[in-house]
Image (cartoon, helix red, strand yellow):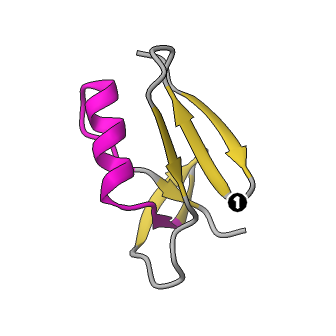
C-alpha cells in the first residue's frame, strides 16, 4: 500500500491512492516525547497520537507509530 504525505499549513496530510485521507495536526507541546533514531542519530520526537498510529497501522498492515520532530 502506498501512502502519500504532504504538508498542508501546519498539518501533515496522509493519503492513499484509494482516496483515504488523514489530516494530522502538529502534536501539542505536552505530547509524549519518544526516543527515535534518524540516519544514525538518536533524537526525541513528539508522538502524533493514536488516531494517526491506527490509520497508518491499518493502512500499511503492520504496527506503526507516527512522530514529529520539533522545528
The image shows residue 17 at horizontal and vertical percentages of 51, 14
Q: Is residue 7 left or right of residue 52?
A: right
The residue singled out by tag 1 in the image is: 10
Query: Residue 60 is drawn in which quadrant?
Result: top left
The answer to whether residue 33 is magenta is no
At 51% from the left and 77% from the top, the residue drawn is 28
4 lies above or below 11: above
At 61% from the left and 48% from the top, the residue drawn is 12
The image shows residue 34 at horizontal and vertical percentages of 41, 67
63 lies above or below 15: below
Label 1 SS: loop
- Residue at the limit of the structure toward the bottom, as seen here: 30
Using the image as rendered, state which of residue 21 and residue 30 is in the foreground.
Answer: 21
Using the image as rendered, state which of residue 71 and residue 2 is in the foreground.
Answer: 2
The answer to whether residue 62 is magenta is yes
Circle 1 crowding by C-alpha within 10 Å: few under 14, some 14–19, many from 20: few
At 46% from the left and 85% from the top, the residue drawn is 30
Quarter of the image with the C terminus in it: bottom right
35 lies above or below 4: below
The image shows residue 57 at horizontal and vertical percentages of 29, 36
Quarter of the image with the N terminus in it: top left
Using the image as rendered, state which of residue 36 and residue 50 is in the foreground.
Answer: 50
Query: Residue 43 is drawn in which quadrant?
Result: bottom right
Magenta span covers which residues? 44-65
Using the image as rendered, state which of residue 52 and residue 19 is in the foreground.
Answer: 19
Q: How many marks?
A: 1
At 45% from the left and 15% from the top, the residue drawn is 18
The image shows residue 61 at horizontal and vertical percentages of 25, 25
Amino acid at each position: 500500500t502506498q501512502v502519500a504525505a504532504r504538508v498542508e499549513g501546519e498539518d501533515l496530510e496522509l493519503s492513499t491512492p484509494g482516496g483515504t485521507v488523514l489530516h494530522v495536526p502538529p502534536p501539542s507541546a505536552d505530547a509524549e516525547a519518544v526516543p527515535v533514531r534518524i540516519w544514525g542519530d538518536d533524537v526525541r520526537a513528539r508522538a502524533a497520537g493514536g488516531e494517526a498510529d491506527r490509520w497508518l497501522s491499518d493502512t500499511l498492515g503492520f504496527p506503526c507509530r507516527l512522530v514529529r520532530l520539533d522545528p
